[in-house]
């Protein structure tokens, strides 16, 4: 379980998050919805301990990681897989090497086990035949699937998606969303999805938190979003997509 | 109105000073982390070898070009000057001291600052912008140990033979020009070089190699890690890395010479 308790964050004089509290339970898919540049990706980085809040606590499976040393954070981070908005694949490595990179780096697994897990992810992502290609030769949707495969290879409890369908064509977006749903149903995996696309929320999320001007203005099951009275939520429901 | 202007300037200077001190603090911590990661060399020995090829073997042409050109120029100019005093036989002595103590290591440092420093700054900057460094951290890999430590060790190892090569090429090009331009017998040239070079001359020259390696690698890598703001940010970080490391190489060159020559 991931918990953010009264988290506030400032970049210089700009207040990004104001007293944000969130809970993400295991085996649920939670979406964080909000306009671009509001601090949604920052929340994911806080969950991984990549940045530290000015105040408040970040708790992962009961462990307070807020002021934890970088070296102690590595084991906590492996409980979560992260899919970055730009995929963050290593462009000089092949798909196979990208998928196996962190297993070889951080786990003392025999090479056969690494290869078995890589092959499993290649199959899961439907990338058979592309194993020896560089990321630049793949389409946006394929690269996103490699990034998802890389996040899954550690067998994490929770997977964090930063704008999983941003910049993808409708067919690729649909494939990615089906992949996310399959993860929950087949692998019992929880997920946090940061997005500005409201359709994604209704397609895959069990619950949703809406971030607006640094504050959480809604945090409940997805179905209840239609009943919310906040003017911002009413406006995004009528427009369906946030492009602010 | 004047008072407001003065106050605004004062605020701006204080803000700049605060930023500068914070950056220095971050740079210090970054450097400490890079040195503390040295025990992980067993894990990243392949990266060290890759970097050794990039900063060592691949840098040989530029080091040779700069060493040969400075050796040749010194031989011509100093030879002309010495000829006026009838002291052309001292050409070997004066060029060897200049090449081994000062110009060989300095030019090599500046060339490597441009070549290796720019590569580090742009490569690490691009990785920072595309969140690859965040990805390393997110999946449990220390990016300083993986990306900076191998660069630092490789440059510490490779800058020494590059200095030797630079000295060798500089001296031999000077000897060639002494013989063919100034019509000086090679025996006279080399006789003024070897017996007269003292150990401190080599200490000055070769001590600069690790100092420059540390400056160039850490400054360029730190700037790469600090890149923000898209591709323009990578460009800014790379330029800053080269400018700062070149400036520091010039300053360090002076102080290493001063300290060693005063104490040996």
Image: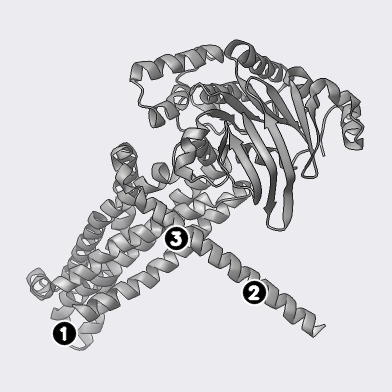
x, y percent for residue A120: 48, 13
Q: Nearer the viewer, mark 1 or mark 3?
A: 3
B17 vs B97, nearest the viewer: B17
B37 vs A61, nearest the viewer: A61
Left or right, residue B197 beside residue B104: left
Q: Which residue is mark 2?
A: B13
Residue A69 visible in rendering: yes
Farthest bottom residue in view: B85
Of pointers 1 and 2, the one earlier in the residue sequence: 2
Q: Which mark is residue A165?
A: none
Within 10 Å of disc 3 (Cα), the crowding (few <14, some 14-19, many 20+) is: some
User: Quadrant of the rendered structure where residue A138 is?
Assistant: top right
Q: Nearer the viewer, mark 1 or mark 2?
A: 2
Within 10 Å of disc 2 (Cα), the crowding (few <14, some 14-19, many 20+) is: few
Count of labels shown?
Answer: 3
- The residue depicted at 62 percent of the width and 69 percent of the height is B16
Q: Which mark is residue B28?
A: 3
Q: Are marks 3 and 2 on the same chain?
A: yes
Chain hosting mark 2? B
B94 vs B48, nearest the viewer: B48
Q: Which residue is mark 1?
A: B87
x, y percent for residue A204: 73, 19
Chain hosting mark 3? B
- The residue depicted at 55 percent of the width and 34 percent of the height is A88
In this picture, is A75 found above or below B41?
A: above
Question: Which part of the image, by quadrant, shows the C terminus of chain B?
Answer: bottom left
Q: Secondary structure at mark 3?
A: helix
Q: Are marks 1 and 2 on the same chain?
A: yes
x, y percent for residue A41: 67, 38
């Amino acid at each position: 379980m991931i918990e953010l308790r009264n988290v506030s964050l400032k970049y210089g004089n700009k207040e990004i998050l104001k007293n944000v509290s969130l809970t993400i339970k295991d085996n649920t898919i939670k979406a964080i919805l909000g306009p671009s540049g509001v601090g949604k990706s920052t929340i994911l980085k806080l969950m991984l301990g990549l940045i530290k809040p000015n105040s408040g606590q970040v708790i992962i499976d009961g462990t307070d990681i807020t002021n934890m040393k970088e070296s102690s954070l590595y084991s906590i981070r492996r409980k979560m897989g992260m899919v970055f908005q730009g995929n963050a694949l290593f462009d000089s490595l092949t798909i196979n090497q990208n998928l196996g990179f962190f297993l070889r780096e951080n786990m003392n697994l025999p090479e056969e086990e690494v290869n078995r897990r890589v092959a499993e992810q290649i199959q899961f992502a439907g990338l058979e035949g592309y194993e020896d290609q560089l990321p630049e030769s793949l389409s946006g949707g394929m690269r996103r699937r490699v990034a998802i495969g890389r996040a899954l290879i550690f067998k994490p409890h929770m997977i964090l998606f930063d704008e999983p369908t941003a910049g993808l064509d409708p067919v690729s977006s649909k494939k990615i969303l089906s992949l996310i749903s399959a993860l929950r149903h087949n692998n019992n995996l929880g997920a946090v999805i940061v997005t500005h696309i409201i359709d994604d929320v209704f397609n895959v999320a069990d619950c949703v938190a809406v971030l607006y001007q640094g504050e959480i203005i809604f945090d409940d099951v997805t179905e209840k979003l239609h009943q919310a009275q906040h003017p911002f939520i009413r406006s995004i429901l009528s427009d369906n997509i946030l492009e602010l | 109105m004047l008072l407001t202007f003065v106050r605004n300037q004062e605020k701006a200077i204080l803000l700049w000073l605060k930023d500068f001190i914070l950056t220095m603090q971050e740079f210090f911590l970054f450097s400490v982390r890079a040195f503390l990661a040295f025990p992980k060399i067993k894990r990243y020995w392949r990266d060290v070898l890759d970097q050794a090829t990039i900063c060592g073997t691949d840098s040989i042409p530029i080091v040779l070009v700069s060493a040969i050109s400075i050796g040749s120029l010194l031989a011509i100019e100093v030879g002309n000057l010495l000829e006026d005093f009838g002291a052309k036989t001292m050409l070997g002595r004066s060029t060897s001291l200049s090449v081994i103590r000062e110009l060989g290591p300095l030019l090599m440092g500046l060339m490597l600052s441009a070549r290796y420093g720019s590569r580090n700054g742009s490569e690490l900057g691009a990785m920072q912008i595309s969140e690859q460094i965040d990805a390393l951290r997110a999946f449990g890999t220390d990016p300083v140990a993986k990306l900076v430590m191998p660069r630092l060790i490789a440059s510490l190892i490779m800058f020494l033979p590059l200095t030797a090569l630079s000295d060798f090429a500089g001296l031999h090009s000077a000897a060639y020009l002494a013989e063919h331009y100034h019509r000086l017998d090679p025996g006279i040239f080399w006789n003024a070089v070897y017996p007269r070079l003292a150990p401190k001359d080599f200490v000055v020259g070769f001590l600069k190699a690790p100092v420059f390696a540390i400056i160039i690698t850490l400054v360029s890598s730190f700037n790469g890690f600090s890149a923000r703001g898209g591709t323009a940010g990578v460009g800014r970080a790379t330029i800053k890395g080269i400018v700062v490391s070149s400036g520091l190489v010039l300053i360090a060159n002076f102080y290493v010479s001063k300290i060693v020559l005063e104490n040996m």
